[in-house]
Amino acid sequence: MFDSLFNALPVALQFGSLVSLFVGTLVGILIGALPGLNPVMAIALMLPLTYGFDPVIALGLVAGIYNGSMYGGAIPAILLKIPGTPAAIATTFDGYPMTRNGQGGLALKTACWSSAVGGIISAIALMTLAPLLAQVTLAFGPTEYFWVAVFGLVSIAVLVGSDISKGMLGALLGVIIGLVGVDTISGAERYTFDSLYLSGGFDLIIVLIGLYAIPPVLEMAEKSNATYYDAGSFKVDASGNALTLIRQHWRTWARSSLIGVSVGILPGAGGNLAALLSYNEAKRKSSNPDSFGTGNPVGVAAAESGNSADNASSMIPSLTLGIPGNLVAALVLGALMIHGLQPGPQLFTKSPDVVFGFMWQMLITAILLLFLGGMVATRLFAQVLRMPTALLVPTTLVLMAVGVYTVKGNMTDLYVMLGFGLLGYLLHRLAFPLAPVVLGVLLGPMAEQNLRLAMLLSQDDVGALFTRPISQGIIALLLLVLFSQVWKMLRKVRQE
Amino acid sequence: MNFRDIISGIAFLILGCTVVGVGNGFDAGAAYVPMGVGILMCLFSLSLIFKGVTQRLGASESSSIAVALIDHPGRFMATVACCLIYYLAMPTVGFYSTSTLFIILLSLVLGERRPIVVLGITVGFIILLYGLFAMVLKRPLPVEFFLVS
């Protein structure tokens, strides 16, 4: 398996791949630097454009945007106390005070190096753990895959958000959206209401752009009053030597990256949780915890390495099991499916260049951050904050329209996207988490297909779903997640 | 907020019942999952309604301020309306012309009043799109009205 890993390196270093990594990282930093835009939206917008490309190039763009945006989010967090992405919230705690103390340049450089180190460690974790896990999952049959899909769906539904009912309803809504169209096993039409458009089912990318990219743009439009952030007026000094940074922060980087990698593997947990846990741990270990929150560079280093270390590791369950741990991982699965590749352990044997190439791409983009996120580039990217939101809204909507139109050249897709956008907006405002909906669309069909295959193989014996040892292990995990949440809920009720 | 839980619970209950009702007519194999999902949706929506009702009853003693569902209805509706007009006009007017007008119109609606900034960014963005889609990716987009023969 590891031979394939090294054989894929030349693929990741091809000219086309390198260009996509460069462009993706630049776009990622830009998107991350713009408050209101997020990596999920950027990747969802970028995916339709990659239809005609080689999968390696498409995934290179995804890798670049993901790693780039994690660092990009730190720029407004440090300069303006506005987290560019949710994962950059912990960066504001010490990053902004550093800017106020005249150390904005040092804070940005610390963030850049910390993001790069976190990303590198995470990519190494992906390279070493994913092939091993993939070998284990080769023993999985339809029963195990059914339970893995149910586990992924239920754990996201109960862990994300504050209300289990809302999470579950979101997940079930996603499953229903995924059911629309022709049933792949019996050929029967389901929920199509004799519509030719619906018989093809909803295109994943259109649902994703609608649910995830439109609501933040509508919120931006509501808040827009032609104002813009003036980050250009901030004095950014060029202090901070690389060797000094390494000497000062290597312990923090190692600890926070470990936290980030562990959080990334868990379903439902995201970069913001990894950053907050890393920040708290750095503060707890510090000899001077009171300095945190007043401009301590260790706080920036912990938050940034923590949130970036979550990136590649979140791909481990996605690539090996086909179960995305977060939305970017779901988009990576979407990208693979768009290019005719089926995620799961077979991917490692059928398309090793693509899957291992992607791992190298995650590593290369983390290293690229050191060059593209340097002082000159950072000064340049700080200028994107000057873009008026009143113009950012229509330009983003045009990008969505062109991206969705180019998928099939069908105008109806644009109305469907807007419809899902309004649904996403409404659900978001009613405090329904959107991640379970998207994962329901992705995992629902996978769960159904494997359940029906398992039933066919066992000649409709339902008991067969519970007898295999791996299935029993997954069911035990599922029950553990459910009971822990119910226990938390009961404790909360008792306290109230 | 609790009232919203009740309403959204009822909406999901109706959806769940519809899913079960329609799924009832499917072939046996194709019906299992839709029926199961529909039934689960009904159960969870009932739990949401129950929670909403109990919270509502509890909240009647102390007043609570509900957060608006839409912060700025005017801008929200204007943005959605502009999108619909944009999508309707695109097949006949053409992609680049409609997009140019859409960006200018929506930015003005949203409060941008600096003509040079609006025109500069719009023209630059459209040129970028043209370069990417027409020259690099060569993707067919709705043809401009002045180019239709």
Image (cartoon, coloured by chain):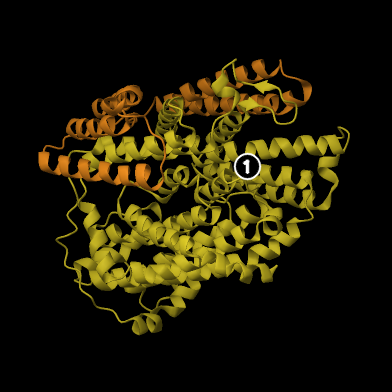
Chain colours: A yellow, B orange
Q: What is the count of numbered marks?
A: 1
The picture quadrant where one finds residue A441 is top right
> Does residue A3 sit above or below A200 in this rendering?
below
Which residue is depicted at the point 50% across and 60% down?
A311
Of all chains, the one bearing label 1 is A
**Residue B112 at what x, y percent from top left?**
15, 37
Give how far across and how far down residue A287 sits, in percent.
Answer: 39, 79
| Dot 1: element | helix
Residue A137 position in % (x across, y down): 74, 56
Amino acid type of the residue that numbered disc 1 sits on in the rendered structure: Val
In the displayed structure image, the side of residue A95 where residue A117 appears, left or right: right
The residue closer to the viewer here, A96 or A435, is A435
Q: Which residue is mark 1?
A: A154
Q: Residue at x 31, y 55 (%)?
A: A33
| In-image side of A379 versus A480 (left or right) | left
Q: Is residue A361 above or below residue A169?
A: below
Q: Quadrant of residue A305?
A: bottom left
Q: Is residue A99 left or right of residue A93?
A: left
Residue at 82% over, 35% down: A455
Q: B50 and A303: which one is in front?
A: A303
What residue is shown at x 27% (from left), y 65% (from top)? Answer: A378
Is residue A89 something that shows in the picture? no
In this orientation, which residue lies closer to the viewer: B121 or A457?
A: B121
How far across and how far down the image is residue A150, in percent? 67, 42
**Quarter in which the N terminus of chain A is drawn:** bottom right
> Can the viewer see residue B147?
yes
